[in-house]
Image (cartoon, rainbow, N blue to C red):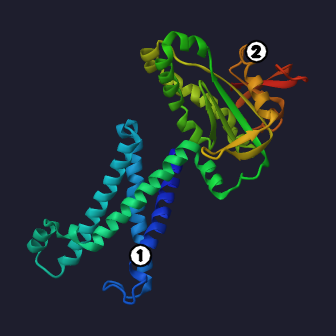
Amino acid sequence: MRTRIQAKKLIFAIFAWGIAMAGFVFFRYAQTPNLPQWAVGTADLATLSIYMGIVFGSLHWMSNLIADFSAINRLPYLFSVIFKGLFLLLGATTLAYITQFLNMWAVENHMTTLRQMLTPHIIYNRSFQAIIVYLVVVRVGLAFIEQMALLVGPRVLLNIGLGKYHKPRYEQRLFLYLDMVASTNHAETLGDYRFSRLIQDSFSQLSDTVVNNEAEIYRYMGDAVLIHWPLKEGIRADRCFNIYFEFSQQLHWQREYFKKQYGFVPKFKAAAHCGQVVAAVVGVQKQEISFFSDVLNTLARLQEQCHPLNQRMLISGELESLVDKDNCQYTLNQLGPVKLKGKQHSIEVFGVSVN
């Protein structure tokens, strides 16, 4: 799954840089009456755009990969952007020198070629300076888009950009609600600062499983988090169950760290429910896509029943009826009708456990 995600990121980087390089080549060369010396026809300009898109897209992806899987990821975001920019510029400079080296190899002796390679004259070339400035602009722009996607979610960013939810619309959604057990006691014991670090450390373990199960974070609410999918996507391959149990496993694997830092391993309870919601963009200064429905209220009330029913995870009867029982790797235990707080009618509730 992680390989597939990185492959998608690589394809996106190459696609984005391909468009950026096509724009650069178009404005740099295609607007002049004469083609550059190295181009036989206009097809060579398109080839250059593709070539540069692949090279810089790959460098872009590599810089993100190094930053994500190293200590750079823990530094302030500005330092991460600077590292990624320097990595790209180093790659561009190396590429320029290699290209110059190959061009000079056939026309001069090798020692002369190597001696000229050590001189900085290529840096003062106006064409090279122009593309360096352009690379900086594109890299900063893509970094901004990537950071916005992290803050609001890639699908949310795309949908806001396309204006999909500027008019309220009905959708079928599946929601998963995760809440820390005994959070009030933990907050009193640890204090505000250490408790906030506990929340950070806990939810950092959630990141990979959210991505792997193609979910989106709707909202963080202190020690709780609300996750969602389009209904069919959330049911597929037990995704709505996988996230909770994989998250719990991640916390268990990091138990030594949590015990050392906080004296205990945090535990979470979960509930899942589905139904029709109204989705709409809300706000002007800080826009977000919000969901309006009794589904969310029912979900919160359902999660409150985990402790009284002695269950780690609960789901509603509506969701249970949609689960593919023949291929489900989890056991769904019927707990009967339960009267939820503030609700007039009882709903069927099921507990979820690993087979």
**Residue 346 found in image quarter:** top right
Q: Position of residue 30 (x, y in %)?
A: 43, 82
Q: Which of 278/334 is in front?
A: 278
* Residue at the extreme bottom: 33
Q: Which mark is residue 1?
A: none
Q: Secondary structure at mark 1?
A: helix
From the image, tell me which residue sits under label 1.
25
Q: Is residue 96 above or below residue 26?
A: above
Give the residue furthest to the right.
Answer: 345
Q: Residue at x 32, y 69 (%)?
A: 130
- Image location (x, y in percent) of residue 121: 17, 70
Q: Is residue 329 at least partly visible in the picture? A: no
CA gap, disc 1 and disc 2: 65 Å
- Quadrant location of the N terminus? top right
Could you tell me the amino acid type at mark 1? Val
Q: Quadrant of residue 308?
A: top right
Q: Position of residue 300 (x, y in %)?
A: 74, 26
Label 2, residues with CA under 10 Å away: few <14, some 14-19, many ≥20: few
**In the rendered structure, which amino acid carries the disc numbered 2?**
Leu
Query: Callout 1 environment at 10 Å: few (<14), some (14 to 19), or many (20+)?
Result: some
Residue at the (37%, 89%) spot, across then down? 34
Q: How many marks?
A: 2
Q: Is residue 218 left or right of residue 70?
A: right
Residue at image position (12%, 69%) is 114
Q: Residue at x 58, y 25 (%)?
A: 248
Secondary-structure class at tag 2: loop
- Residue 309, label in figure: 2
From the viewer's perspective, is residue 287 above or below residue 26? above
